[in-house]
Amino acid sequence: MSKYKKVYRDIKAKIDRAVFMANQELPSEGELMQYYGFSKDTIRKALSLLEIDGYIQKQQGRNSVVLAHDVPKPQMLSEIKTVGELNPTTSHQVKTTLTDLYIVQGEAELMRIFNVNEQIDFYRIGRTREIDGERVEYEVSYFDRRIVPFINRDIAEQSIYRYLESELGLEISYSEREIVFRYANEEEENAMDLGQYNMVVSVISTTYLADGRPFQYGSISYRPDKITFASTATREVKNK
């Protein structure tokens, strides 16, 4: 894990545990450099990521201030998190159900994204997610079997990422994402309780390991009233 991400995760954890309270100023960059033993550039990268994710607000000429956060948290656009990590204290009943698990090969989109020929195969995993008894999410994921050689029902219905990190020792680094608002397809209509909605919010992503290799491609489709994305945008005011 990169140094700035270590700082980011540690400060974020302290904010989540209320070690740093809402509206409290963080230590100065110099104090954080001394505490973590990293360079100013590393500290600034960590603070910038915390600001992007809405945890802090940087102030010109002053220390960064912690912003208030509600629980459960919305999906932060710059984070890769499981449902359990997003809402560890949620009072909602969440259930993941495996709908299909099989091996595919020769699919043009996968061959293009992973830059492979038709001989390379992938796990295709379909999962629905119920929240308080309603199926409001449908996920389809493809995993490169050269990197992830084995997945079974138990793994797929629990946390695949926990298995990849804890059992296989993989270091998951980043994800490229595209968010699309579109009409639901037949597969989604059968897998989800869409009710009055005929549209979904689809997040299409390719996820990479720390060494730059893509290992997962797929999409998560959400019922529109059951998903919120959050980010923080900043505007740089140039001196006149």
Image: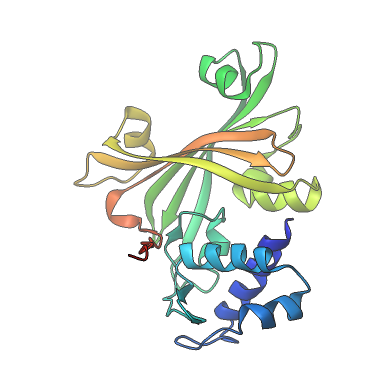
**Image: 204 above or below 21:** above
Name the image quarter holding residue 17: bottom right
Color scheme of the displayed model? rainbow
Whether residue 164 is visible, yes or no, is: yes
Classify residue 179 as left or right of residue 13. left
**Image: 214 above or below 163:** above
Q: How many marks?
A: 0
Classify residue 183 as left or right of residue 139. left
Image position, residue 142 (x, y; %): 58, 31
Residue at left offset 52%, top offset 51%: 96
**Quadrant (top left/top right/bottom left/bottom right) for the C terminus:** bottom left
**Image: 204 above or below 15:** above
Image position, residue 148 (x, y; %): 73, 35
**Image: 63 above or below 231:** below
Q: Nearer the viewer, residue 155 or 116?
A: 116
Q: Nearer the viewer, residue 75 or 36?
A: 36
Residue at left offset 57%, top offset 55%: 82
Name the image quarter holding residue 217: top right
Whether residue 141 is visible, yes or no, is: no
Image position, residue 152 (x, y; %): 69, 38
**Quadrant (top left/top right/bottom left/bottom right) for the N terminus:** bottom right
Q: Nearer the viewer, residue 236 or 208?
A: 236
Image position, residue 187 (x, y; %): 38, 30
Q: Nearer the viewer, residue 106 or 64?
A: 64
Looking at this view, name the residue that lies furthest to the front.
240
Name the image quarter holding residue 214: top right
